[in-house]
Amino acid sequence: MTPISIAFLPLTDSAVLIAAREKGFAEEAGIALDLVRTTSWATARDRLVYGQVQAAHMLAPLAIAVTLGLSQHPAALAAPFKLNVNGNALAMASDFAAALDPDPVRRLADPIAAAHDFAGAIGLHRRKPVIGIVHRFSCHALMLRYWLATAGVDADRDVTLRVLPPSLMVEAMRAGEIDGFIAGEPWGSVAVAEGLGEIVAAGSRIWQRGVEKVLAFRADWIEAQAETIDRLLPALARAAIWCDDPANHAELAELLERPGYVGRPAAELMPALTGQMVLRHGEPPVTVPDFMLFQREAANFPWRSQALWIYSQLVRWNMAEADEDNERRAADVFRSDIYRRALAGSGLPMPGASMKVEGALSTPTAVGAHEGALTLGPDRFFDGRAFDPQDVTGYLKGLAAIPPD
């Protein structure tokens, strides 16, 4: 058996790693999987960079930021496998949410109107709203910035963004230290269940099938351990298929519930798995289709175009310099070549291309694929814009042309 240690955070989107270990997929591939529970993304990053673990459940933008030298302890990282798409939610304290559209279903259905309501509520609040984010370099934070900017809100001026580990968000809200937070599940659902806040936006409605967590490795390790990677990734793909099957959701929630994993009641974990989300305490759940995907529609495939969208946002918010070298290095973090090599012969369909125009699909669309037929689901951004990875500069110029409200 080949031992592999992977750092993870107690989140619902760690499910594929937990299923790979607990359901025997890793063991069948000859891998002794050791999952190391970690409370913050900074610690997960450091464990990986300093070689305490071989891989990490990681925020996709953090993997790119570490590679570009934007985060502490720069190192070249590689992400050959996405662990999920979407799965985060913005929860705001009840007093703030009271200034928004009173119908929480309408808020979710119309993100643009909700963003404008949010902008208006800022001036009515008792202070500049303090919003918890899990890391500066997270898709959650980038989506929040993008969403607010549509309504003329400058996240660096009009709100205060405070970095906290996901598992501490609810307690910080209870203590009045933050007015809301955007984080991966189950923490938004926990805030709702405890009557502290309401879900006012969902990542899956800001960017359908948007990139979330990846499995990151040090680039030098992944190149030296090709045979191990070629056994690990198919095992994870099988685990992801198991996680996506609705027949397994109750059992998956029971696995995640264990203290060594997420450690929250199954009732708080099921909403993200089923897409049946309670938006306000005491109200019935509403269906949020495709709230989080683990495998279907090539969810695990590391699109280089998605890495470049992340890069574009880092440039947009003055976190990274715009230059050709940074653009190339960012795209190179998402290793679609390794994914294809490891999954060759698995029978799983995979995209024939490594980049696509992000946000261009409004309906399920058949695309060219290796090893079978592949249909991709809608991947629209809430504002209808599309991101052409061949023209990052043009995309950013288009965003800059949007006048603030």
Image: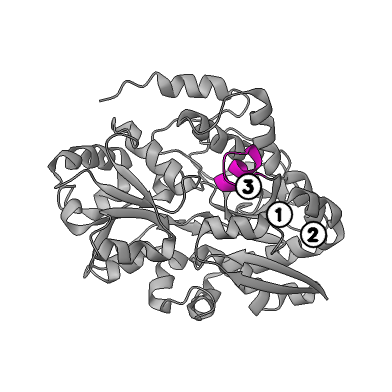
Mark 2–mark 3 Cα distance, whole angstroms, equals 24 Å
Highlighted range, magenta:
61-74
Q: Residue at x 81, y 64 (%)?
A: 231
Please say if the residues under marks 2 and 1 sit with CB atoms less than 8 Å apart: yes
Front-most of residues 62 and 73? 73
Instruction: Judge the density around disc 3: few (<14), some (14-19), many (≥20) Cα neighbours within 10 Å.
Output: few
In the image, residue 147 lies at what x, y percent?
A: 36, 39
In the image, residue 194 lies at what x, y percent?
A: 26, 71
**Residue 191 appears in the rendering:** yes
Q: How many marks?
A: 3
In the drawing, what numbered circle is on residue 229?
2
Question: Which residue in the structure is indicated by mark 1?
Answer: 217
- Placement of 353 over or under 187, stated as above or below: above
In the image, residue 94 lies at what x, y percent?
A: 19, 58
**Residue 148 figure quarter:** top left
Position of 296 compared to 278: left or right? right
Q: Is label 2 or label 1 in front?
A: 1
